[in-house]
Amino acid sequence: MRNIWKMILAGGMGITMAACSFQGDSSKEDPSFRGNDSVADKRKITFVLDWTPNTNHTGLYVACEKGYFRQEGLEVEIVQPPEGGAEVLVASQKAQFGVSFQDTLAPALVGEGALPIQAVAAVLQHNTSGIVSRKGEGIHTPKGLEGKKYATWESPIELATLKNVVEGDGGDFDKVELVFSTVTDEVSALKTKSVDAIWIYYGWAGVKTQVEALETDYFAFADLNPVFDYYTPVIIAGNQFLEEEPDTAKAFLAALSKGYEDAAKNPKEAADILCRAVPELDYELVLASQKYLSDQYVADAPKWGYMDEKRWNGFYSWLNENGLSEPELPPNIGFTNEYLPQQRGPV
């Protein structure tokens, strides 16, 4: 990560642009619009995705189309991540905001190569990831992974998480067959039996198994151990940008919050907006995924984006206790709720 950061600081890495129509339909715009119609007068914001556009990002596209960023005097450009992820672009001030994950963010926050970034909003309120497998093969609980082929990307945190839930279910983690794999189509991988079990985010890959009529078994990590109910994904920003332009950060998150709140209230409209912006997406999958995630964006939180201190610190304490962070992660590192809109009404 340090080497990738140096390359970006030297201007040695390009980024691929993706469309974001920040103007929106003027008929839908709030009459209290505070921005200037001239693009030249707007504060330009670069937002880096974590992957190709999907329903984790819908609130961003809703805010674009409905003119919420324009109302805040912002021009937003969405870009694809470089090989090193959104973190390096945000840290180097090539982008102001991006998408990351609490688990993969941890190594970037401490040590000699620590990046000056932090999470400023949670996209989803709960961890929707878990293990999917073909139905009826005994992997409906973690112990069932014994003797089965699990597709691993060989991350220490990933494997420690899996070991925790397998052993917590009375299983022997050493009996799990770890197969290095860069699965991009979970349905195909399960149908062809190249692997037996895959770590997925249910809101996309899990929904996809339903859309494609693949019968599966599934267990979620957060249901097995509350320490795994961490925040994934999250919106990150650079520390220097936050210090120098706090009002801009708050304006961006105010508009983004509106986008996600709208997506939660009207998943079909949100799916339509995402597919207009990214027409190559499968509409049936997007709509089904959007309906699932509409209950996940805010869920039981006081507002969209809020991150609970106890849950955030609980996961990082678990990493420390299991030797998964060197040096250890101090309390309250890497996140803030300071830039989110103020709570509207009673919680």
Image: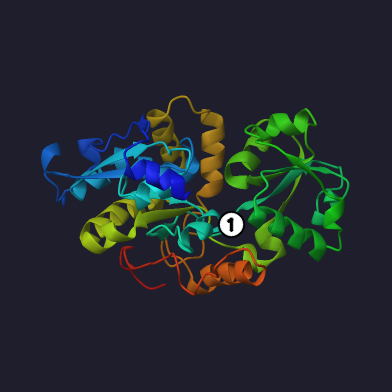
Residue drawn at (34%, 38%) of the image? 78
Residue drawn at (46%, 72%) of the image? 332
What amino acid is at disc 1? Asn
Residue 297: % across, % down: 48, 54
139 relative position to 93: left or right: right
Using the image as rendered, state which of residue 225 and residue 92 is in the foreground: 92
211 relative position to 37: left or right: right
Instruction: Please state, as top left, top right, bottom left or bottom right, where the C terminus lies in the image.
Output: bottom left
User: Which residue is under mark 1?
Assistant: 127
Q: In this orientation, does residue 148 appear? A: yes
Q: Quadrant of residue 103?
A: bottom right
332 relative position to 328: left or right: left
Residue 227: % across, % down: 63, 67
Q: In this orientation, does residue 262 appear? A: no
Residue 217 vertical placement versus 120 (above, below): above
Q: How many marks?
A: 1
Residue drawn at (47%, 24%) of the image? 280
Residue 305: % across, % down: 42, 60
Using the image as rendered, state which of residue 237 and residue 295 is in the foreground: 237
Residue 322: % across, % down: 67, 68
By what rule are the colours in the image chosen?
A: rainbow
Using the image as rendered, state which of residue 106 and residue 47 is in the foreground: 106
